[in-house]
Image (tube, rainbow, N blue to C red):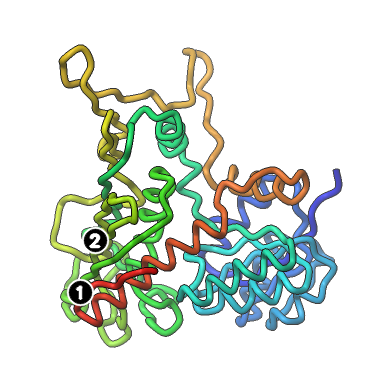
Amino acid sequence: MSKLKVGIVGCGGIANGKHLPAIKKNGNFEIIAFCDLIKERAEKAKEEYGTPESRIYTDYQELIKEDLDAVYVLTPNNAHAPITIAALKAGKHVMCEKPMAKTYAEAKAMVDTAKETGKVLTIGYQSRYRSDSQYLKRACENGDLGEIYYAKAHAIRRRAVPTWGVFLDEEKQGGGPLIDIGTHALDLTLWMMDNYEPESVMGSVYRKLADQKETGNAWGDWDPTVFTVEDSAFGFIKMKNGATINLEASWALNTLDVDEAKTSLCGTKAGADMKDGLRINSVKYGRQCVEKPNLQAGGVAFYDGTAEEPTDIEQRVFFDAITKGTPLTVKPEQALVVTQILEAIYDSAKAGKPVYFE
């Protein structure tokens, strides 16, 4: 099978740290074009991941004119929707980084355009492909937990504010930790519950530590003058079937209870969490018990096998969806609901009252 011809829009951190290495490792893609507002970044990406014939652009409108099968949208959040929609209308399949968009309206337009064009659209929620996530999803689908009626979505860092790029820029990103890492935790939780019908949201958003100095931050002190987003946010989500979800997200919070891109689930038959590896708690034969599946890849003394990385699986699923028509793991309609809830948490916090959905 011939390689898929793809173009990369956005050659910054997420491209170089996640997608480009995984694309190269996959071997079934040929990167025809690189685009970035900073030309030097596109040139550097071409050097490492392209071919001598790969083209360089600073305008995505020019890139999507190329004879491409797919486009990767790896830009700040405010550019996700316009680039994705333009690429889909140009007849390209699209892998867009998370979150889907800054707003629900933008994300909805992306979903509608994918349906109109018949092109594949997926969002970069790679946490679904982790071994613990895959195991827990199978348990949920098998009914091992019963009816899941309460859950927590965890995205808590103690002092790990990203100080590079545009992470602290509300205009370009749409928010801070809630839209950055809270989005992964919420996506995992909704996916495990297989519940995408929110009824209402109550949110609280804080900017309490952003003006402090000598912060102890993992990546060095942040600049308070450009820190225009929240440092923590919390949401209480009620679903139409009565289930409830607590979502917690922070880049900076005075806590030792640190977890990121994890979920805790409570069902009528059992519960599960990712606090100390994957743990499934239940009652068997009248006794409380905890099961911890061995998710390591190795099996025998002379073979230390390694599992496929989540980012590798993500690329394979995208390739197969385009070439074989196999189902997507991350459907755009699901990512749309994640954006809808995140936006509602911000709106609720501003208004000081719940947001209700139709």
For label 1, the crowd category at 10 Å Cα-Cα, with few meaning under 14, some 14 to 19 and many 20 or more, is some
Q: Position of residue 328 (x, y in %)?
A: 62, 48
Query: How busy is the neighbourhood of tag 2: few (under 14 within 10 Å), some, or many (20 plus)?
Result: some
Mark 2 element type: strand
* First reached walking from the N terminus: tag 1 or tag 2: 1
Image mark count: 2
Disc 1 to disc 2: CB gap under 8 Å: no
> In the picture, residue 246 is in which quadrant?
bottom left
Q: Secondary structure at mark 1?
A: strand
Is 229 or 342 nearer to us in this picture?
Answer: 342
Q: Which residue is mark 1?
A: 206
Q: Is residue 206 left or right of residue 178?
A: left
- Name the quarter where the N terminus is drawn: top right
- Residue that label 2 marks: 236
Name which residue lies at 25% across and 46% down.
150
- Name which residue type carries label 2: Phe
Q: Which residue appears at 26% of the width and 39% of the height?
A: 266
Closest to the observer: 37 or 230?
230
Could you tell whether 262 is left or right of 106 in the image?
Answer: left
Circle 1: residue type: Tyr
Is 19 on the left-hand or right-hand side of 244? right
- Indicate left or right for 215 with 108 as reference: left
Q: CA distance from mark 1 to mark 2?
A: 15 Å
Pinpoint residue 73: horizontal percent, then vertical percent. 61, 68
* Front position in the image: 63 or 328: 328
Q: Residue at image x 50%, y 56%? A: 334
Name the residue: 28% across, 52% down: 154
Above or below 226: residue 125: above
Relative image position of residue 152 (x, y in whole percent): 26, 49
Classify the position of the C terminus by image quarter: bottom left
